[in-house]
Image: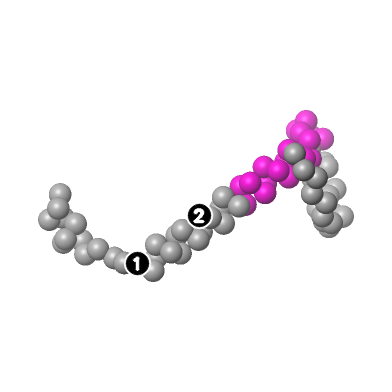
Amino acid sequence: MVTVTHRIDEDLKALLDRYCEQHGLKAQAVVQEAIAEWLEDAEDIELIEERRKGPWIDWEDVKNTL
C-alpha cells in the first residue's frame, strides 16, 4: 500500500465521513473502491468510443456466415 494525499472539498469530506459512520466503513476503503470503479468505467468508455468508429460489418455478410 502507498499513501495518496489530495485535497477535497470540505462538504464532500463531511458526506464521506457521515456515510462511512452510518455504514461502518473506512474512508480509505470507500475512496479506493471509488477510484477503482472510476478507472474501470473510463476504460469502458474508451473501448466504446473506439468500437463506435468501426469498422462495421454488413448484417447480410454476418447472416451468411451463420
* Residue name at image x 63 percent, y 46 percent: 36
Q: Secondary structure at mark 1?
A: loop
* Residue name at image x 67 percent, y 49 percent: 35
User: Where 33 sits versus 41, above or below?
Assistant: above
Task: Classify residue 2 as left or right of residue 56.
Answer: right
Alpha carbon distance from label 1 to label 2: 16 Å
In the rendered image, the residue lying farthest to the left is 64
Residue 44: mark:
2
Q: Is residue 58 magenta?
A: no
The percent coordinates of residue 46 (x first, y second) are 50, 61
Q: Residues within 10 Å of mark 2 (few under 14, many from 20)?
A: few
Q: Secondary structure at mark 2?
A: helix
* Residue name at image x 57 percent, y 57 percent: 42
What sort of colour scheme is used for the picture?
Answer: one colour
User: Where 15 sits versus 8, above or below?
Assistant: above
Q: Which image quarter is the N terminus in?
A: top right
User: Where 4 sits versus 51, above or below?
Assistant: above
Q: Amino acid at mark 2?
A: Asp
The percent coordinates of residue 23 (x first, y second) are 75, 33
Which contiguous range is marked in magenta? 21-38
Q: Residues within 10 Å of mark 1 (few under 14, many from 20)?
A: few
Task: Classify residue 37 as left or right of residue 58.
Answer: right
In the rendered image, the residue lying farthest to the bottom is 53
**Quadrant of the rendered image containing residue 52:** bottom left
- Say which of 9 and 46 sits in front: 46
Q: Amino acid at mark 1?
A: Gly
In the rendered image, the residue lying farthest to the front is 2
The percent coordinates of residue 2 (x first, y second) are 77, 43
**Quadrant of the rendered image containing residue 11:** bottom right
Residue 25: mark:
none
* Residue name at image x 76 percent, y 33 percent: 25
Residue 54: mark:
1
